[in-house]
Image (cartoon, helix red, strand yellow):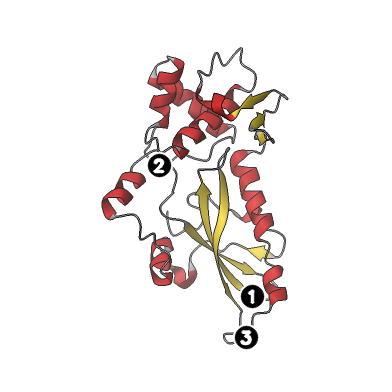
């Protein structure tokens, strides 16, 4: 249910350092995800995207590129309340989740916020934990010179990411390559990357969708949008 802040798997309690708590429900015991309303109140909603474009993106295989997701956490010792805006970054290779907004509220309204308090916000640790969990950080690492090092030690050029993937039983790092190709196609604006992957490798759509599903199961791609195949 959307009243539970962990409903989409974007942030879970284990992503938070000791001393921080992720409430199950939104403030005010809301039964819905208030992210869109928070964006609108803050003027954070993307004015460059019209409603037709928004609906097209939300109905595609792409991850949330239009709307971030606000999540509410509390510091146990001080009762400080913090809202974090989480958004998937599709233009990274591989994809990742980054914090794109912060609202910091001291427990006692009117208390001052110091630079020291802001520095103590564990945003980098939370980002790292989310990406470790969602992408399993067996991820490839981009090297200087446009090369990507795969877990086996093999290096490939970014321009080779859109070549046929080969046989999963014979290709080292096959599912890492699946994740990288899927991410690159999505970053390029492909609304149906699984279909394009099938075409690139000369296989049936169901085969490519199976590859993507296995890459997700291994934590190399984030969970897919509910109701979408790829």
User: How many residues crowd around disc 1 within 10 Å: few (fewer than 14), some, or many (20 or more)?
Assistant: some
Percent of width and height locating residue 5:
50, 58
On the rendered structure, is 160 left or right of 35?
right
User: How many residues crowd around disc 3 within 10 Å: few (fewer than 14), some, or many (20 or more)?
Assistant: few
Q: Earlier in the sequence, mark 1 or mark 2?
A: 1
Residue bearing the label numbered 3: 111
Under circle 3, the secondary element is loop
Q: Which mark is residue 79?
A: 1
Percent of width and height locating residue 110:
58, 87
Residue bearing the label numbered 2: 226
Residue drawn at x 61%, y 49% as measured from the top left: 130
**In the figure, 133 relative to 208: above or below?**
below
Corner quadrant of residue 79: bottom right
Q: Earlier in the sequence, mark 2 or mark 3?
A: 3
Q: Earlier in the sequence, mark 3 or mark 1?
A: 1
Residue drawn at x 48%, y 49% as measured from the top left: 8
Q: Nearer the viewer, mark 3 or mark 1?
A: 3
């Amino acid at each position: 249910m959307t009243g539970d802040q962990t409903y989409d798997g974007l942030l879970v309690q284990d992503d938070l350092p000791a001393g921080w708590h992720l409430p199950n429900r939104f403030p005010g015991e809301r039964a819905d995800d208030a992210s869109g309303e928070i964006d609108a109140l803050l003027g954070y909603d993307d004015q460059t995207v019209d409603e037709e474009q928004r609906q097209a993106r939300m109905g595609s295989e792409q991850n949330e590129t239009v709307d971030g997701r606000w999540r509410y956490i509390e510091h146990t010792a001080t009762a400080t309340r913090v809202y974090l805006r989480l958004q998937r970054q599709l233009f990274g290779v591989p994809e990742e989740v980054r914090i794109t907004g912060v609202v910091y509220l001291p427990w006692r309204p009117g208390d001052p916020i110091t630079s020291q308090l802001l520095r103590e916000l564990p945003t980098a640790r939370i980002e790292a934990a989310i990406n470790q969990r969602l992408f399993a950080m067996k991820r490839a690492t981009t090297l200087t010179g446009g090369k990507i090092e795969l877990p086996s030690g093999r290096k490939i050029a970014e321009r080779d990411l859109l070549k046929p993937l080969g046989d999963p039983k014979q290709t080292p790092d096959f599912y890492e390559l699946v994740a990288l190709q899927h991410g690159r196609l999505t970053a390029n604006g492909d609304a149906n990357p699984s279909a394009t992957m099938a075409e690139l490798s000369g296989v049936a759509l169901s085969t490519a969708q199976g590859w993507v599903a296995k890459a997700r199961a291994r934590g190399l791609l984030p969970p897919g949008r509910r109701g979408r195949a790829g």
